């Protein structure tokens, strides 16, 4: 099966809603960001890594968003980073609001990935 490729126009920025609608959740879930289920890190194609186990509360989650936003990257790449955090850590769910444990949620996501590949 061919890999899904979406190339947005270079002169237009996308909203998070548009990025979510345009992405292929199987072949291109988060643009240039990839989740490593063994190490529980989110990384880009240049090797920049975010250790999801270190995110212990909402403040640290927001800190990472602002930290990554300060890097030289496109708004689309930042949007995909936020979508990846949402998909992996699920900060809008009751579970996160009670535990706010990045390690627990990243490990649960890794298990879901492994189960889907089995």
Image (cartoon, rainbow, N blue to C red):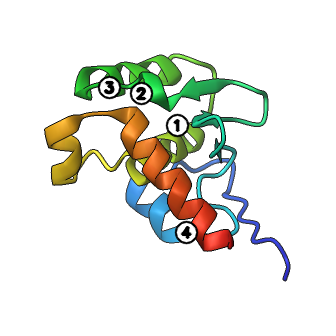
Q: Nearer the viewer, residue 110 or 49?
A: 110
Which is more N-terminal, label 4 or label 1?
A: 4
Quadrant location, the C terminus:
bottom right
- Residue 37, above or below 66: below
Labelled pair 2, 3 in contact (Cβ < 8 Å): yes
Residue located at (38% from left, 25% from top): 55
Query: Is residue 103 in sight in this rendering?
Result: yes
- Residue 4, above or below 112: below
Q: Is residue 43 left or right of residue 17?
A: right
In the rendered image, residue 3, in percent from the top left (x then y), is placed at: 81, 71
Q: Nearer the viewer, residue 35 or 7?
A: 35
- Residue linked to disc 4: 22
Q: Residue 62 bears which disc, if any? A: 3
Which is more N-terminal, label 4 or label 2?
A: 4
Q: Mark 4 to mark 3: distance in Å?
A: 25 Å
Q: Is residue 11 left or right of residue 88?
A: right
In the rendered image, residue 100, in percent from the top left (x then y), is placed at: 24, 34
Labelled pair 1, 4 in contact (Cβ < 8 Å): no
Q: Nearer the viewer, residue 77 or 99?
A: 99
Q: Mark 2 to mark 3: distance in Å?
A: 5 Å
- Residue linked to disc 2: 65
Residue located at (66% from left, 58% from top): 8
- Residue linked to disc 1: 78
Labelled pair 1, 2 in contact (Cβ < 8 Å): yes
Q: Mark 1 to mark 4: distance in Å?
A: 15 Å
Quadrant location, the N terminus:
bottom right
Q: Mark 2 to mark 4: distance in Å?
A: 21 Å
Residue located at (73% from left, 60% from top): 7
The crowd level at tag 2 (other Cα within 10 Å; few <14, some 14-19, many 20+) is: some
The crowd level at tag 3 (other Cα within 10 Å; few <14, some 14-19, many 20+) is: few
Q: What element does badge 2 sit on?
A: helix
Q: Residue 56 bears which disc, if any? A: none
């Amino acid at each position: 099966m061919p890999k899904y490729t979406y190339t947005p126009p270079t002169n237009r920025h996308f909203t998070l809603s548009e990025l979510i609608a345009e992405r292929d959740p199987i072949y291109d879930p988060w643009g240039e960001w990839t989740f490593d289920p063994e190490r529980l890190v989110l990384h880009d194609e240049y090797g920049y890594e975010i250790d999801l186990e270190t995110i212990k509360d909402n403040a640290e989650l927001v800190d990472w968003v602002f930290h990554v936003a300060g890097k030289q990257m496109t708004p689309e790449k930042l949007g995909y980073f936020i979508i990846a955090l949402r998909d992996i850590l699920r900060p809008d769910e009751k579970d996160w609001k009670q535990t706010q444990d990045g390690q627990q949620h990243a490990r649960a996501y890794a298990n879901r990935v492994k189960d889907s590949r089995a």
